[in-house]
Structures are given as C-alpha cells and as structure tokens.
Amino acid sequence: MATLADVAARPSSRTGEAALRGAAILLVAASWVSAGLFGAFILAFYGGTAAGGAAGRWNETLPNLHSANLAATLAIGAHFVTGGTLLLLGPVQLVAAIRNRVPALHRWLGRLYVLSAALAGTGGLVFIATRGTIGGPAMDIGFGIYGALMVLCAGLAYAHARARRIERHRAWAIRLFALAIGSWLYRMDYGFWFLAFGKAGHTPDFRGGFDLAMDFAFYLPNLAIAELFLRARRTGTAPALRYAAAALLLGASAFILLATWFFATRMWFPGMAAGWQALSG
C-alpha cells in the first residue's frame, strides 16, 4: 500500500519525467536539423570535391587532410562519408514513433548506422596509424580513443540488439549517438571559441592550450551528458536530478540552434555550393 510520502511525490515525479522527455525531444529535433545540415555539407563538399578531382580542397577545412598517401586519403574519405551518414541517420533512430510503428525500418537503418559508425571509427584509426594528425601525439591519442570508442559502442549496440537486450541496446545506441556528433561539435566549439577569444590558445599546428583541451573535449562531455540522461530516466530517480538533466538538455538545444544558424550561413551552405560546383564543373 502506498504511503502518503509516495502519493505526495508522484506529481513531482511525473512532472520531472515530462520535463526530461520534452527537453530530450527538443534536443533530438535541434540535433537532427543541425547534424543533418552538417552531414549534407560533409557529403556535398568532401564527396563533391573528390568526385570532381579537387580533393586537395579538403585542406581548406583542416590542414594536411589530403596528401599523396593513398591509404590515409582513402581512410579519411571513408571516415567523412560514413560520418555524414551517421549525422543524417542518428536522430531518426532515436525517434520512438519510428521504432514502435516501423520496427523493420528501425532495424535496417540501425544496421546501416552501426556499420557506418564502425567504418568511421576504423577509418579514423587507419588515418592516424598511416599518417598521424596535425596536432601530434596528443591529438593522435585523443582522436584515437574517440575512434576506438566509436567502434566499441557500435559493436555493443549491435550485440545487445541481436540478443534482444533492448534496454542495454538503447543505452549503447545513445552513447554511440553522443560520440557520432563529436565531429560536428568539434567544429562548432572552435568557431565559437574564435568568435569569443580570437586565436588565443590555438596554433597553426593545433598544439596550443585550447587545441590540447579540444583533443578530448569534443566527445567526453557528450558522453557525460548521455550518462546523466540515462541515469535520470530510470524509474525511481529523484525529481531534482530529472530537472537538472532537463535544464542541461535545454541549454544544449539553445547552443545547437544558435550555432547551426551561424555555421550554416557562413560555412555549410557555401561549402555545399562549392562541392556541387566542383562536381558539375
């Protein structure tokens, strides 16, 4: 029989759960729009310039991406193509209505998503092993851990889905999504840092103080937020934790929407146009 304390706690608990759910939906929607635009930019710019014989323009976005090293170029090219696929498909996989109403579509897109994540992670690792990053050992380690975590999360999400351990599968899929948006957030973080502080902490060889922090900061905070969300949505979680998680998700949504407007108008749309021009010209 429920106690008075239990009865009194239920409205707050339900309100906290609704707040968390609403904040999560908003974040997924904001991420879908922004990541979709960034994914389209990746496919259009990198794919278009490569197909048009102008792959050397990759170095306009990050120095030393394209070189005469065929293995490294193929690896980073695979990383970009599959990374763009991840950004386009990720938010779709998080929509409960699709999972519940069209489970076959969710499963097949999930297989493609997991395969893309494994290839993106492996491509990045091969690039690091054969060429190395511009930032040297620190960036090699940070980005190497990122690639390894992508492969790990993809494998565990698939393994739990195959074994019908649905809750564990969803947890690892959420962690995988948090990692997949890392490449997108990496560029956003740099853009906002430059706007706020100029080139302080950044050097051309990506070995300044801010650069060293960003070797890890583009994915570890994402994982921390994912873990907080996973714990907050568990049954019996204190309402205060749910409200805190909801506030954090709302703040992330606001940041994403503002950053999307800035980068879409100044970089992504012009980059898409450049890719299409290279492909058609």
Image (spheres, rainbow, N blue to C red):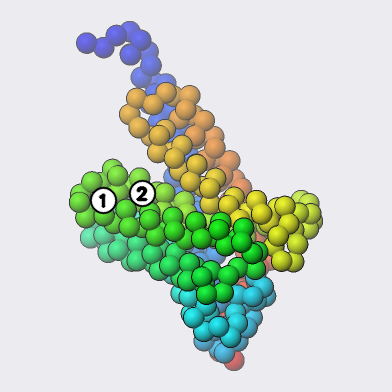
Q: Regarding mark 2 in the picture, which secondary structure is present there?
A: helix
Between 107 and 165, the residue placed more toward the observer is 165
- 112 lies above or below 92: below
Callout 1: 10 Å neighbours few (<14), some, many (20+)? some
The image shows residue 149 at horizontal and vertical percentages of: 44, 55
Quarter assignment of residue 250: top right
255 horizontally vs 204: left or right? left
Q: Amino acid at mark 2?
A: Trp
The image shows residue 70 at horizontal and vertical percentages of: 52, 84
Q: Which residue is mark 2?
A: 172
The image shows residue 279 at horizontal and vertical percentages of: 55, 87
Callout 2: 10 Å neighbours few (<14), some, many (20+)? many
Label 2 to label 1: alpha-carbon separation: 9 Å
- Residue at x-position 44% and y-position 64%: 121
Q: State the residue lying farthest toward the bottom.
A: 281
- Residue at x-position 53% and y-position 69%: 128
Q: Quadrant of the N terminus?
A: top left
110 horizontally vs 35: left or right? left
Between 221 and 30, the residue placed more toward the observer is 221
Between 124 and 140, the residue placed more toward the observer is 140
Q: Quadrant of the C terminus?
A: bottom right
277 horizontally vs 159: left or right? right
Closer to the chain start, of discs 2 and 1, is 1
- 94 lies above or below 105: above
- Residue at x-position 20% and y-position 51%: 163
Q: Amino acid at mark 1?
A: His
Q: Which mark is residue 160?
A: 1
